[in-house]
Image: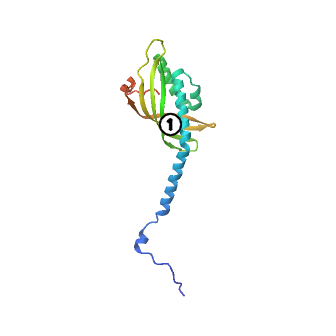
Amino acid sequence: MQLQSTQLPLRPADRARPRVLPAVAGCALALVVLALQGCQDRPLAERLVCAYDEAAVAAYAADDFAGLSKVAGEAEQDKVRARVARKSRAGVRLEARLDRVEVTAVSRPGPDELIVDATERWRYHDRPVRPGLSPSPEIEAVVRLTYDFIRRDGGWRVQQVRAASTDYQGHRPASAHLGEPVAR
């Protein structure tokens, strides 16, 4: 005796149609998880970028590297020290003010790694260390940066900062005309 099926036979069009719904749902779920992770990491990323910027400003303005040693790895500290030394040899100090930071992207390649893209608006000028000399003209720049952070020994440190672009509003530094990177 043959049992009769209550299921209707598939039409040829139904047989040819791939079953993509589970794959699409899986991809959508993965994107939601990634987006939520980025949202959770954004406040951390903003704090880390601002802490680094504050420490860099102090280093450039007054040879104060105490804060930088807490937020930056050795290679990044060495880069800032070299730029500060170059400014000192020229007889100037960089005085900078950060007007705005906007974290535009956050990714986490690993549990102890954070990559942050930020757009920052800076105003800065060189102040001569000898009394009586005038500071250089103020420069306003919007800089797009990528920060690579690593967590070690319970704290986050900048391993590298890369400038993707710098847009000057008004006066440009002489080094920008020569193609030399501008010290931040």
* Residue sitting nearer the eye, 153 or 96: 96
In which quadrant of the rendered view does residue 66 lie?
Answer: top right
User: For the point 44% across and 66% down, which residue is it?
Assistant: 18
| Badge 1 element | strand
Outermost residue toward the right in this view? 153
**Residue at the front extreme?**
99
Q: Is residue 64 above or below residue 32?
A: above
* Residue 58 x %, y %: 54, 25
Farthest top residue? Answer: 132
Residue 68 lies, in percent from the top left, at 56, 28
Q: Residue at x 40, y 74 (%)?
A: 12
Give the color scheme: rainbow, by chain, secondary structure or one colour.
rainbow
Residue type at the position of mark 1: Tyr
In the image, residue 44 lies at what x, y percent?
Answer: 56, 40
In the rendered image, residue 47, in percent from the top left (x then y), is placed at: 55, 36
The residue identified by callout 1 is 147
Above or below, 117 relative to 81: below
Locate residue 167: give its quadrant: top left
Q: In percent of the image, x 51 and y 23: which residue is there? A: 60
Residue 139 in the figure: left or right of residue 54: left
**Is residue 14 toward the left or the right of residue 47 in the image?**
left
Neighbours of disc 1 within 10 Å: few (<14), some (14-19), many (20+): many
Query: As rendered, which of 134 and 129 lies closer to the eye?
Result: 134
Q: Name the foreground residue: 158 vs 117.
A: 117
Please determine whether, in this image, residue 150 is positioned above or below residue 79. Answer: below
Considering the image in quadrants, where does the N terminus appear?
A: bottom right
Residue at 54% x, 52% y is 33
